[in-house]
Structures are given as C-alpha cells and as structure tokens.
Image (cartoon, coloured by chain):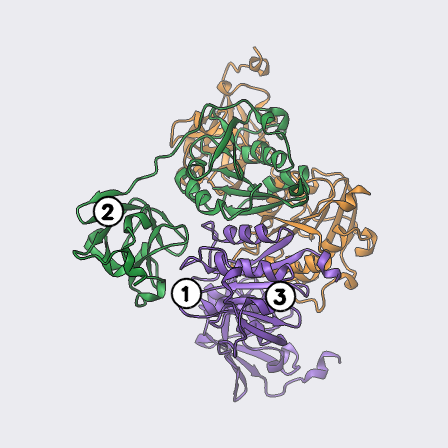
Chain colours: A green, B orange, C purple
Amino acid sequence: VSAARLPLLITLTTDFGHADWFVGAMKGVILGQTPGAMIVDLTHAVPSGDIRAGAFALLAGCRCFPPGTVHVAVVDPSVGSSRPALAVRTTDYYFLGPDNGVLSFALARERVQAVRRIENERLFRQPVSASFHGRDVFAPVAAYLAGGGDFARVGPEAGGFVRLRWPEPQVAKEGWTGEVIYVDHFGNAITNLGPEQLGGRAPQGVELMLPGRKRCPLAACYQAAPVGQPLGLIGSCGLLEVAVNRGSAARSLGLRVGSKVQVRFFARPSRGRSHKA
Amino acid sequence: VSAARLPLLITLTTDFGHADWFVGAMKGVILGQTPGAMIVDLTHAVPSGDIRAGAFALLAGCRCFPPGTVHVAVVDPSVGSSRPALAVRTTDYYFLGPDNGVLSFALARERVQAVRRIENERLFRQPVSASFHGRDVFAPVAAYLAGGGDFARVGPEAGGFVRLRWPEPQVAKEGWTGEVIYVDHFGNAITNLGPEQLGGRAPQGVELMLPGRKRCPLAACYQAAPVGQPLGLIGSCGLLEVAVNRGSAARSLGLRVGSKVQVRFFARPSRGRSHKA
Amino acid sequence: VSAARLPLLITLTTDFGHADWFVGAMKGVILGQTPGAMIVDLTHAVPSGDIRAGAFALLAGCRCFPPGTVHVAVVDPSVGSSRPALAVRTTDYYFLGPDNGVLSFALARERVQAVRRIENERLFRQPVSASFHGRDVFAPVAAYLAGGGDFARVGPEAGGFVRLRWPEPQVAKEGWTGEVIYVDHFGNAITNLGPEQLGGRAPQGVELMLPGRKRCPLAACYQAAPVGQPLGLIGSCGLLEVAVNRGSAARSLGLRVGSKVQVRFFARPSRGRSHKA
C-alpha cells in the first residue's frame, strides 16, 4: 500500500553502450507510460552479446536496491528469434530479460515465486521491431509491472528458465583451484573463490598462486600491498579478487576471464580463531 | 492542466562525452530552476562536432518520449559565434539547439508550429560563457519551457532554420542505391533505404549489394544469418540496416557513413501479397 | 522548510567508470534509504586514482547546483586503509569524500562551516566491504544527510582536511607563466591562468606562448580562429584555456596536464578601458 507512494524503481543492465539513443529510448517509453518511475542504469557497457558478463553485473548490483524494484537485463544476441522473453517474480523483485541465462546468476540467490513468458502483445510498444525488444517489449512491460500491473497478465507460466553454469571452485591438494569470472574497470580480477574456500584462515595462513606461478598474499585492503604489487582480498561482491595496489591486475598479471587462481594453505595454518585471538 | 502534475521531461543529446562535468553541470542548472524535472540522456557520445550524427540520434530517439517533452540537442562547434540558438514548438514537443541543422532531421517528421530565436538574456545563466551555451543558455531555457514558461518570451520569431540534406535513395537499374547514414555501437550500418524501397517484396525477392560486390540476403532477425555472416533487416528506426550475426558489420564489411548499399530485386520478384499467401 | 518538499539532490563524482555496476549500486543504496532523492552524475570517468582530476571536476561542476545539494566525490585509492572519510558542511552544500584532497579545490571556494569525520557505523551499509566505501559508507551517509539527517551524528569533528596544492601562476618578464591543469573531452587544455593575469587587456594586447615556442592569439570564441588553428579563451570555468577550432589542442599541440603556457603582453598594451572604447 505505502509502496504506491514511493517512486517506482527500475534498473537497466544492457550491452547497448552509450554511443547511441538506445538506452534513452527505453527510458522514454517507460516514462511515457509510468511518469513517476525512477530509472537507474546498472550498466550499459556489458561487452556486446556477453551474456555471462551481464549476468554477473546483475548479480553484483541487484541486491543494493530496495524491495519492489524491477530489474531489466537486456543482453540479447538472439533478439527477434523464437527465444522467449521472461518475467520472474521473486520475494523482493521483478526480473525481466531474454531467456538466455542473463537473469540466472541473480535468480540463484533469490527466492523465485513465479516465472512467466512475456507474450501479451497488448502490453508491447507497437509496432514491435525485430531488433530492439529493449524498447518495444521489455521497457513497456517493466513500466507496467513497476506501475502495479498484474503479473499474471504478462503471459503464460513458463516451466523454467535457462541457467548459465557457475564454475564451482575445485578442491586441490593444498587448497582450492578457482578461476577469474569478471574483470572490472580497475583491472581487478574477481574469482569464483570466496570466504568458504578460505575456511576462516587468517591472511597469513594463505597465499594465492596465479598463472605463471606468480604468488601473492592476501590482504585487508589494496594499500596493504606495496604500490604496483599484487594482493588478494575479499571484494565488495563477497568474492576473492586479485588486485594490484594503484595498478591493474588484469594488465600487469595478464589475468582475464577463465584465468586459474589457486588458494594455497600453508603447512601450519592459523585457523579461524586466530582472527579473534 | 493535468500535465502540470506529471514530471517535466527533458532529454539531452550532445557531443560532450562522459569524461567531464559538462552534462552534470547542465542538469544542475535545470534542477536548480525546475526541481521536479526528470532529465534523460539520449546520448552524449555524438562524435565531437558531428552535427549529422547528433541530428540522426535525435531523430531516432525523440518520438519514444511522451508529448510535452523538451528535447535539447547541443552539438555546437560554432558556440559563441553569431549562429542563432533556436527553440521550436511542434504539436508534441519543444526542440532546442543551435541553428546548425542538428534539429532538422527530427523536425522533418514533426508538425512545426512556431520557431523562435533564443535571445532573451534574462532567461540565461549569468555570466554567459563563450564556450558552454549548453549550461548557460540551453539548460535554463529548457527548464523555463519545461516548467510551463511562455514560449513567446524566449526571443523573436525566426524565419526558418538550417536543414541538413537528407540523402535520398536513388533508383537503380535493378532496384535502389542508398548509403549508410549511421553506424551504431554494435557496428550495425543503418542506411537511408526503407520499406518503400523494398516495395513490399518478400525477403527472398531481394538481396543487398555491398561495397566490394559482397552480397547479403534480407532476413527477419540477426540470428537468421549464420554466425559471422551479414544480413539486412528493417531495424528499429524503420530503416534498412546491414548487420552481422554476433559480429560488427562496420568492422567485418568495412562499412562507414557514406558507404553505398544497393537493394537489388530478382528477375521474378515475389510481390507484397506473398507475405500473406 | 520549503526545501523539504523539493527533490533531494545528490551529485556523484568518481573514478568508477561506466563498465560495471558500481555507480548503480551506490544509487540503489541511496534510493532504498531516501526514495525521493534525485541523483546526478557529475562524472564517473575520472582517471583511476587521479585525485587532482576528480578535485578539478568537482570544483568545475559543483556550483551549478542549488543550495542544499549533497556532493559526493569518491576517488579513493586508499579505500579500506586508515585514511579518514570526511563530511563537510558549507553555507550552501554538503561535501562528502575521502580525506585525500579530492574535496579541497571545491572547498577553497566555499564558506566551510564544519568538518566531521564519517565514523558512525550505524549509518553505514553492513557489512562494510574493504574496497567499496562508495556503496557502503558514502552512499548511505549522503542519503542520510540529503534526507535531513543530523550532521553532528556522522562522526566527530575533524581538525582540518587534506588540501591539494593549486599551482599558482608565476609573474614572468613580459606577463605570466602558468600551466595546464586539466584536459577535457574535446582536447581543450584548461590552465591555471585567469582574467586576473590578463589584467583587463584586450585580446589584441596579449598572446600565448605554448611549448615549442608556438604562439597563439586570444579570441572571443572557438570559431574566431581559422579551422585547425589554436586560440586561447576564457572558458566556462572562468579560466584561460587553449583550444583548436574544430580540433583537439591536446592532440595537435601536445598539451597535457603540467604543460607550461605563457601569457605575454605586447610592448604597448591596450589596457582595460579599450574594451569599452
């Protein structure tokens, strides 16, 4: 009830870039239909057609938004073909996007309540183009839902949705083997390793082994390493990332998506309780 | 009347880029004057001083916005000289920009009601700089008009406005010759050819001839071509564009603004009715 | 009082770039806490860790915003270390950022009323990450202050703040020696020289000496120089900038931050009154 007085919040995650009018066009459609909407760009710089990168950006950013937010993710190289368009209702949010996995990393952390295929053409902007469903399908349906529209009207229930494989860390002889899953603007290399793999060990009990047998320590912040030197830390997504103090880990260490990163424990690890000792 | 309770909508199209504070400064001026305004970036990545590209972006995006929107386009290499600044009222919108043609593609599709030169310095931010009329002239006048200001007060009536030449498709022996007028972020090459040139023919009755005598078929969506292969389709602007499935037509075919693209009909075209047959 | 009904205005200046979800995440935190906030990007393209460039962007843009605006600047290579986070109240604004000088150029032009260290963890987003205080510290505190929160609650009074050195123009034999302090998107080179150094002289009484003993005239607008030729003008920040008509001064003249620029007066300068004569 009271939510009706709050601004309606819609986020956009796309590979549309900033060079053209594409994002602005989506916003025009939304605001024409639901004038009170507040639209936030999560990112529009997903590499063209890189569904995994879009899925990761949505995962990393979506939970910063309050309940009721409508998250729209359009990385959609098969636009105009027969791939379904999805609307997913979770306990806290709506998620809209093509059924190609772009929603799946975020949905794995949400409580999914209902999944529908977006097929009700009466909700679309007409005529629907072959190449811009962001403007013609997702924007008007997002506006409809943000404005309090009936979820059941977007289309029929879907049996499920495409899930991208999340690479699981592998147990190794002296620790864990993981891989880089995202490289950010600063050149920080975010891995699939997290606190569970560190097992509560203090930083002194762990080191990272990077490609080319380069080693680096764990640290509490970037500046704990000398300028230009690498370190690992638990980053803002809750995942282990490899960084270089005042530099780019991607550039200076040659890290990219898929690069292997090992967590190695020392022979006499100081266990979790050492944090509090 | 009821429009007064809607958010006031202003769009910005510029070549200011994202590196500096220029766009933010315009927004600060607008919001200081008209606090309820909603400001949407159409694009700020128009190549420096490329009036045609700005004019095309405005054309392509402006009609996604609801009536009452104020569209501001500042691609203005002659800022500070004697070139006039224009405010144009159409049936649905206001358009503001320098009188260098940047508004002209969009205006060609609108019903123009009145054209005025922006000359009322009492509406400007003072002091007016020599190099940033986006902040000092266009932003405050846009805020004034979005807030319900009197159009007649912006300045005297103008006799007309500068129009950029829109390249018309040429009839060729077996079809039409057109050219690329815009290359987007994905490398899709948008042409001046449209449905009229296809004359209702089914895709099987038409092919495109690209520079270097490369041929490509028409298709209904990007994915209808094999990965890495070119196709033509009627894009989201209603114009024929050349694309490469999961690739960049600009890069792999060497297309750029001005590149010639031919529509060629086959000897026995299947006419429009074949769509429905 | 009436300000409470205005949209709450928050600006963001960061080096987070546009590739990732970082800026969107900050906005989600702000809007979750203070739904009516209007958030404006000043710029997110400050070069990574370039505190001076961020400080200059904030200086150049902040005064375009109405009183009551909360300005947040996060260029923070030492995030997670012991560097303090600051909140500064001036007559017109709040300024928030790390205490590394990023606020100092802007603050030098404001009337500072109070400076506090942001230390009240009850205002933070929990858990606070080691690497993203933009999201976990600055965004929630900005939302708190924009929403009318008590400034004294953000943390204890600070004795002062880090100030970056502003390079002062030097008197030279025939005029002044200054330097480039910022290069913008268009390649215009903004210097630390201003109207005071020109001393009211008419453009004809002054010339600029650029590196490599290249000379250029002062002009009233870009177009006053031939296409491709350099000129100096008082730009939109009120500082002398070197530009090239329809070109990039940075590229064609090799100007960068720190490049020396001399103002030279002619033997018989026509003094200020010549403006009005």
Q: Is residue B80 left or right of residue A263?
A: right
Given residues C256 and A79, the one toward you in this image is: A79
Read off the residue under disc 1: C77
Read off the residue under disc 3: C150
- The first of marks 1 and 3 along the sequence is 1
How many other residues sit within 10 Å of disc 1, few (<14), some (14-19) or many (≥20)?
many
* Spatial separation of the CA atoms under disc 2 and disc 1: 29 Å
Q: Chain of mark 2?
A: A
Numbered label attached to residue A172? none
Residue drawn at x 72%, y 64% is B125
Query: Which of pointers 1 and 3 indicates the residue nearer the eye?
Result: 3
Q: Is residue B155 visible?
A: no
Query: Which of pointers 2 and 1 indicates the residue nearer the eye?
Result: 2
Asked if marks 2 and 1 touch (Cβ < 8 Å), the reply is no
Element at label 2: strand
> Residue flagged by tag 3: what amino acid is it?
Asp
> Residue flagged by tag 1: what amino acid is it?
Pro
Location of the N terminus of chain A by quadrant is top right
Q: Is residue B254 above or below residue C175?
A: above
Element at label 1: loop
Given residues B69 and A34, the one toward you in this image is: A34
* Spatial separation of the CA atoms under disc 3 and disc 2: 47 Å
Question: For residue C111, which quarter of the picture?
Answer: bottom right
Q: Is residue C120 visible?
A: yes
Residue A38 in the image: state x and y as whole percent.
62, 46
Query: Which of pointers 3 and 2 indicates the residue nearer the eye?
Result: 3
Given residues A129 and A209, the one toward you in this image is: A209
Location of the C terminus of chain A by quadrant is bottom left
How many other residues sit within 10 Å of disc 2, few (<14), some (14-19) or many (≥20)?
some
Residue B276 in the image: state x and y as whole percent.
58, 13
Read off the residue under disc 2: A176
> Residue flagged by tag 2: what amino acid is it?
Trp
